[in-house]
């Protein structure tokens, strides 16, 4: 993908962002989102295991995602974070990188920069 940060390839692999039912669908991810995510990963200095990146509408429905999911637009990921310490480090880095839409669940953190949605929000699942 043209325009990606040179560090992207060090921290992530394209397939991490694929919808399980559509190999190569990482190409639907927003470049600016991925560059910002790369910056957050550098700041956190811990691995980000992506559990959900781009989702096709059918996969989104299958996993119970809302119809207006930012995952279907390539503007969201879920990051595995099972401990409170990991959550703190990841959320802190996401905020420093400029993200302002964060959802916190038991085992993951959702982050998106969907321009069609309200900014400056944190929610729990």
Image (cartoon, rainbow, N blue to C red):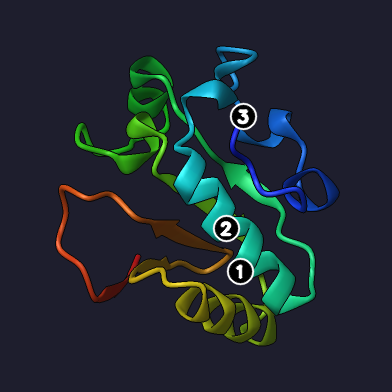
- Residue 62 left/right relative to 41: left
**Residue 81 seen in render:** no
Instruction: From the top left corner, tell me how far across and down residue 114 is, in percent.
Output: 28, 49
Circle 1 packing at 10 Å, graded few (<14), some (14-19), many (20+), is many
Q: Secondary structure at mark 1?
A: helix
Residue wearing tag 1:
40
Q: Earlier in the sequence, mark 3 or mark 2?
A: 3
Instruction: From the top left corner, tell me how far across and down residue 38 is, in percent.
Output: 65, 58
Please say if 77 is above or below 28.
Answer: below
- Residue 107 left/right relative to 69: right
| Furthest residue in direction front, as rendered | 3
Circle 2 packing at 10 Å, graded few (<14), some (14-19), many (20+), is many
Circle 3 packing at 10 Å, graded few (<14), some (14-19), many (20+), is few
How many numbered badges does the structure rendering display? 3
Compute the Cα span from label 1 to label 3. Answer: 20 Å
Residue occupying image coordinates x 59% and y 37%: 3
Residue wearing tag 2:
37
The tag on residue 2 is: 3
**Residue 29 seen in render:** yes
């Amino acid at each position: 993908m043209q325009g990606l940060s040179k560090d992207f390839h060090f921290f992530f692999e394209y397939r991490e962002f694929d919808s399980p039912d559509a190999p190569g669908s990482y190409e639907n991810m927003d470049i600016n989102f991925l560059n910002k995510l790369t910056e957050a990963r550098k700041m956190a200095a811990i691995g980000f295991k992506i559990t959900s990146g781009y989702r096709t509408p059918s996969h989104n429905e299958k996993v119970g995602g809302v119809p207006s999911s930012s995952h279907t637009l390539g503007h969201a990921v879920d990051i595995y974070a099972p401990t409170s310490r990991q959550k703190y480090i990841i959320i802190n880095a996401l905020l420093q990188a400029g993200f302002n839409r964060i959802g916190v669940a038991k085992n993951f953190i959702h982050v998106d920069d969907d321009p069609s949605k309200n900014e400056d929000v944190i929610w729990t699942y």
